[in-house]
Amino acid sequence: MKSPAEARKILAALEKHHPDADTELAHRNAFELLVATILSAQSTDRRVNEVTPALFKKYPDARALAKAEASELEALIHSTGFFRQKTRALLGMARTLLDEHDGQVPKSMDALTALPGVGRKTANVVLGHALGVPGLPVDRHVLRVSNRLGLVHSDDPVRVEEELGKLIPKKKWTQASDTLILHGRRICKPTPQCRICFARPLCDYAHR
């Protein structure tokens, strides 16, 4: 693994590619981001952003979503894939918010991951981008890029989250994750474009 100082240099190089990195899921509040992140599983942010305007117009909050007919919700989110599973998760999540949190999105990892359809990645996205709590989402892009760079050596998302958390200051967790995600989408793809990567001099994969 790299040292915290090396990690800072690597992230600084990546930030040159992706200044002001942020989530690409459109949202106006924590509830909308929670819904959008659940929908983003096995889908693209672009597709989710095409679906959510009509979804949020019809179901603007947990109370409205909890009353949704499953068939109507399925029709709205069909194009994001796995629509039946996601419908069950969204309805369960909304009803749990009403029953246990007065319809509000909770601000703790434990409470978020207790919601139907919400794992650590989704919880970290919502915490970091909508609730002001540092979060370090680990998706397939973060796994691939952080391992190639030599920041971590694991395919376990929970362990990678823990190890990256030791290398990166807590206040930068969310931005660092966003930067790694965008780098994985745009440059460090399954077939990487190493020749244009600013982090190449510091990357284990580029020098193996």
Image (cartoon, rainbow, N blue to C red):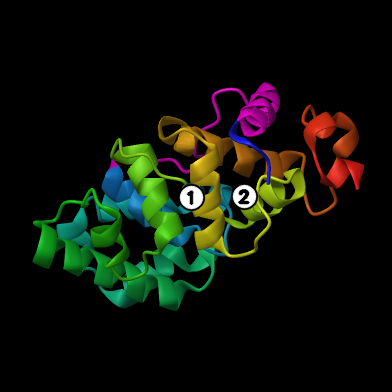
Q: Does residue 22 belong to the magenta stretch?
A: yes
Sequence-wise first label, 2 or 1: 1
Say what amino acid the circle numbered 1 marks: Pro
Q: Which residue: 56% across, 55% down?
A: 160
Relative vertical location of residue 202 with respect to residue 59 in this rendering, above or below: above
Q: Which residue: 54% across, 24% down?
A: 20
Q: Which residue: 64% across, 55% down?
A: 143
From the image, tell me which residue sits under label 1: 137
Q: Position of residue 55 (x, y in %)?
A: 35, 55
SS state under label 2: helix
SS state under label 1: loop
The reply to whether residue 156 is in sight is yes
Q: Does residue 118 belong to the magenta stretch?
A: no
Q: Position of residue 66 (x, y in %)?
A: 19, 67
Q: Return the residue nearer the eye: 80 or 12.
A: 12
Q: Please state if 158 lies on the left or on the right of 15 as rendered.
A: left
Q: Which residue: 57% across, 47% down?
A: 46
Say what amino acid the circle numbered 2 marks: Val
Q: Return the residue nearer the eye: 146 or 98.
A: 146
From the image, tell me which residue sits under label 2: 142
Q: Return the residue nearer the eye: 172 or 139.
A: 172
* Separation (CA) of disc 2 from disc 1: 8 Å
Relative vertical location of residue 67 with respect to residue 3 in this rendering, above or below: below
Q: Please state if 185 lies on the left or on the right of 113 as rendered.
A: right
Q: Position of residue 84 (x, y in %)?
A: 43, 77
Q: Return the residue nearer the eye: 166 or 192.
A: 166
Relative vertical location of residue 178 with respect to residue 117 in this rendering, above or below: above
The answer to which image quadrant residue 39 occupies is bottom left
Magenta segment range? Answer: 5-29
